[in-house]
Image (cartoon, rainbow, N blue to C red):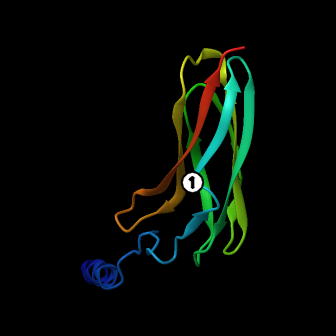
Amino acid sequence: MKYLIIILFGLGMAFPAQAQVSKADDFKVVFNDTIIDLGSVIKGEKASETFTFINHGSEAVQIDLVSSCECTTLDWSRGKIMPNEEGFIQFTFDSSSKDEPEVIDIEIFFMNKDEEGEPRFRIINYKYDLARP
């Protein structure tokens, strides 16, 4: 029994588990735009736009979480986005609580991991000029 444990341990060392990480060339998400200019928005109005991207990598990508400020409502592609398929990040900006022009970050966290095992992420932006009613 002791020898069986030693043999199994030795086999485990010979075939280490592979981490589920992406090589740099496997993960390539390309956005059509990384910043959208909403132009002039009247205080109190809402404005909506959509970012699109294509998976130019060799592995499926999947969005885990998308976040932004409280003034932004978000929707995004659910499920896996296969190579050469398109995904989206849709946002609605509510200008009610704003008093000046601003650039807003949208952070996208993917389920795909980098070489260190950390989630891949991207930051895209939108901006606006605030007009008074």
Residue 85 position within the rendered picture, expressed as x and y whole percent measured from the top left: 72, 70
Residue 83 position within the rendered picture, expressed as x and y whole percent measured from the top left: 66, 74
Query: In the rendered view, would you say 41 is above or below 38?
Result: above
Residue 117 is left or right of residue 111, and the answer is: left
Residue 70 position within the rendered picture, expressed as x and y whole percent measured from the top left: 58, 25
Secondary structure under badge 1? loop
Q: Which quadrant of the figure has residue 125?
A: top right
Query: In the rendered view, would you say 15 is above or below 57?
Result: below
Q: Quadrant of the N terminus?
A: bottom left
Residue 36 position within the rendered picture, expressed as x and y whole percent measured from the top left: 63, 46
Q: Residue at x 72, y 47 (%)?
A: 50
Q: Quadrant of the C terminus?
A: top right
Q: Residue at x 60, y 30 (%)?
A: 129
Closest to the observer: 77 or 19? Answer: 77
Q: How many marks?
A: 1
Identify the amino acid type marked 1.
Thr
**Residue linked to disc 1:** 34
Q: Which quadrant of the figure has residue 69?
A: top right
Closest to the observer: 29 or 62? Answer: 29
Q: Residue at x 71, y 17 (%)?
A: 44
Residue 31 is left or right of residue 46, and the answer is: left
Query: In the rendered view, would you say 12 is above or below 45?
Result: below
Query: In the rendered view, would you say 36 is above or below 3?
Result: above
Q: Is the residue marked by circle 1 packed among few (<14), some (14-19), or many (20+) residues within 10 Å?
A: some
Q: Residue at x 66, y 67 (%)?
A: 54
Closest to the observer: 127 or 16? Answer: 127
